[in-house]
Amino acid sequence: MDYTENKIPLIVIAGPTASGKTRLAVEISKLYDGEVISADSMQIYKGMSIATAKPTTEEMQGIPHHLIDFLAPEQPFSVADYVKLAQQAVKDVYSRGKIPVVCGGTGLYISSLTDNVRFDDTAGNPEIRKRLEREAELIGKHALWERLRSVDEETALNVHENNLPRVIRALEVYELTGVKLSVHKANSKSAESPYKTCIIGLGFNDRQTLYDRINRRVDIMIQNGLVDEAKDFYRSHKPATACQAIGYKELIPYFEKNAELGECIDKIKQETRRYAKRQLTWFRRVDGIRWVMVDEFGEYKNFLGNVQNIIAKSEIMCYNKS
């Protein structure tokens, strides 16, 4: 295949949780002979199927999905690791005559892949790292995150305060170099991207519609056995980073008999809504994203047709006839 500009065509389906990304990615893959490459920072872990809303066999409809359910929860995994594996997956899919369809809600994964980001290689300093870890224990994760926000707001807004390793790394880089991690990352985008990309963003005119979808999804997760899944995971993987997944950490007080189940379920819904809001904030800053408002369309075929029109206008699928 010889596509426009000799770059690999890449269709990206992005948006908040519960917006319908999985279904759309599958439909697009069926239409354009594609395969799905996940861009979800929690679906990478083995197990955790209900909490992370991993697509079921039925939902996949025979479309191959990559970078899902392959990593043990105890294993460390960075955005640099993701980009390396995703680049390999894109090449593999394209080499077999298929179209890569990236699908997910982890904005940092998607932007780092499509922008061809080269990652900061500043050597770490164990003394600084240990000092910051001690400070986190003394003053709390939120206070340390607030410190990061005071020196590098852009990075802080894209890192959850519970992701202590990334908060500490950003502060460490700033102390060592005097340069914000966000600036390092901006400088890392100097290499041209090998992809001709069409990014479809799923949005909502009425935010409450999205929140209602989130609440229903959590109820379905509970019906499907989320509590038992989380309990088994908590007993087996307490120290794991994956324990911080929404849907797991909110149930810990229930497991430890410090809260009622109903309270914890409400907390899951609240935290998921907040996460969706953060996702939308991230994607609104992405250059070139084409938004489709999910709640504008009555029938799904009309929604899908609109997405097809956007892909057609992007011309990423046009053959280079020169």
Image: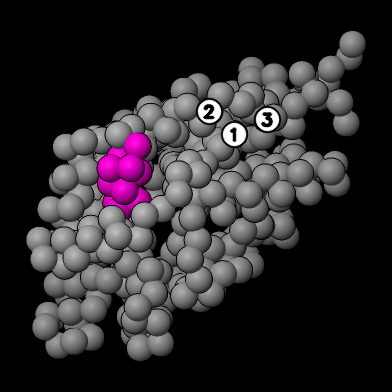
Q: Residue at x 18, y 87 (%)?
A: 256
Relative to 92, residue 118 above or below: above
Q: Is residue 171 magenta?
A: yes
What segment is highlighted magenta in the picture? 166-177
The residue that label 3 is drawn on is 195
Q: Earlier in the sequence, mark 1 or mark 2?
A: 1
Q: Is residue 319 left or right of residue 165?
A: right
Distance from disc 3 to disc 1, alpha carbons, whole Å, reads 9 Å
Q: Amino acid at mark 1?
A: Asn
Distance from disc 2 to disc 3, alpha carbons, whole Å, reads 13 Å
Q: Indicate the position of residue 186 as horizontal and vertical percent values.
A: 44, 28
Q: Amino acid at mark 2?
A: Lys
Q: Residue at x 71, y 44 (%)?
A: 90
The residue that label 2 is drawn on is 189
Q: Nearer the viewer, residue 18 or 72?
A: 72
The secondary structure that dominates the magenta segment is helix
Relative to 288, residue 23 above or below: below
Eye-nearest disc, 3 or 1: 1
Q: Is residue 253 magenta?
A: no
